[in-house]
Image (cartoon, rainbow, N blue to C red):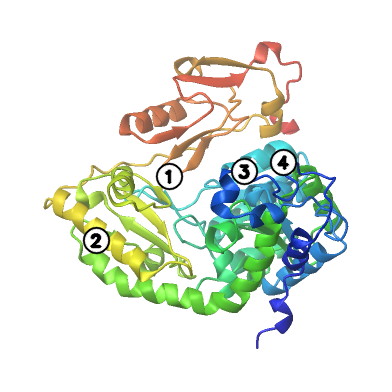
Amino acid sequence: MKDKKQQLTPFFTKLKEYGESDVVPFDVPGHKLGRLPNDLSAFAGKGIYQLDANAPRGLDTLSKPTGIIKEAQALCAEAFNADRAYFLTSGTTGGIIAMIMATVRAKEKIILPRNVHKSVINALIFSGAIPVFVKPDLDNNLGIANGVSFQNMKRAMDDNPDAIAVFVINPTYFGVVSDLKQIVDYAHEKNMLVLADEAHGAQFYFSKLLPQSAMDAGADIAATSMHKTGVSLTQSSILLTKGDRVDQFKLQSTLNMIHSTSPSAVLLASLDVARKQMYFEGEKGIEKALKLRALMVPKFNEIKGVSILDESYAVKRGYDFGFDSTKLVIKVADLGLSGFDVYRMLKDRFDIQLELAETYLVLAIITMATTKRDLDRLYKALQTISDENYEQNQSLPKIKFHYNFPEPFVRPREAYHAPHKIIPLADSENEISAESIMIYPPGIPMLIPGEIINASFLEDLDFYQQSGSVIFSELNNGYIKVIDKENWEKWEDSDEL
């Protein structure tokens, strides 16, 4: 039975009333509720400016909600089976930074998989926490990282009983989920918090056909991107909490440090209405989308050189806890083309925009807004590409994905604030990194600030460069930023991490 009060949109309703009123706006923003026509208002309508108010009387404030924002967040918490919900206008990135800063202090440990989003590394710099990395399951055939086994997480918790928190990804970019409930239960036995990155899992809360959500599994806090797989506007997300392990006052205080003091009312309103829409339409909408997927996947699999990953893939990798079928993971390497090639072809020739490309595959995101026409167009485009490129027994050469854990010398925060210098990569062995280097695929940080650069890392990096992988770093030109030890006043040994 649906709760009728979920039909309410307290923030959006009041904001709309304000925008349509005869108010005299002597406050900011300077467009004064859209009085001056421009190119954007000509396209999107004046209404978008009428909704762009800056916390006047009656509209509440995000930093200390006591009125309609508080009401809207309470409705959101109920819809997501959480105890509390916090609206975010800085994306899930802001939520991840806030939840780590609010729960793990400087020099305290947090256990986390290595295939984390770069926002997590930034959060370590902000908080001063010590990362204890756990190796995820690496698929060498596809060049992607999957989940983390319960056994590996348990080992990390047993080896680090002083850790404050465990960080999980639910799901990975490619739809794989870990044994979240078992990880949560064991972490709580060890008196550790469980933090979840649900940037790609907002839809889990509204369909029993999808894997378990972080809140349903008992996680303490989760950052959820309503704009990615829900239906809100880009950059709007939600931070959810459950239970009494998280200090709500500290969390709100931390959010206030990160939030703009002028958060976008348009983004807040989009969260309010998206929650209502997902609550009432999400179950049927997601079911319809999954039926469309099930209808089309056999056709996709008939295209020569093309195959779709499904739940059987996750089970074969040892992850039988469900699979996020809203992720259409398409292997294209057997076409003799890289995922990057196909990604570009689909947009440039067929006007089809995918989510991302990797060496061997491309990823399409399906939501309740996806139509059969969308999937038909993708099918026809891939069929055309196959007709033009597929040759029997011709596929991309296999790339073996190396993986080594560099030795940490200081915390990421300490390395970030230390004096640095820029040197050639060829001269960097035994230096301490002052930056992060990530390889796509598989998107795992090979090196983060504070780790010692060793010969294995340099060999692996050269391997990836030769293989044509995409490298993300600050410089990316044969140089690297390292700690300038000669001018570093404060040396810390490993005991001071």
**Structural crowding at the residue carrying mark 3, measured as other residues with C-alpha within 10 Å and reported as few (<14), some (14–19) or many (≥20):** some
Give the label on residue 129, or none: 4
- Looking at the image, which residue is at 12% across and 50% down? 391
- Looking at the image, which residue is at 56% across and 50% down? 42
Which of pointers 3 and 4 lies earlier in the amino acid sequence?
3
CA separation in Å, label 2 and label 4? 49 Å
Closer to the camera in the image, 61 or 468? 61
The residue type indicated by label 2 comes to Lys
Numbered disc in front, either 2 or 4: 2
The residue at the far bottom in this view is 1
Numbered disc in front, either 1 or 4: 1
What kind of element bears circle 1? loop
- Looking at the image, which residue is at 69% across and 65% down? 272
Numbered disc in front, either 3 or 2: 2
Query: Toward which corner of the image does residue 85 lie, by quadrant?
Result: bottom right
**Structural crowding at the residue carrying mark 1, measured as other residues with C-alpha within 10 Å and reported as few (<14), some (14–19) or many (≥20):** many
Residue at which label 2 appears: 380
Residue at which label 1 appears: 442
- Looking at the image, which residue is at 74% across and 80% down? 5
The residue type indicated by label 4 comes to Ala
Which of pointers 1 and 2 lies earlier in the amino acid sequence?
2
CA separation in Å, label 1 and label 3? 17 Å
What kind of element bears circle 3? helix
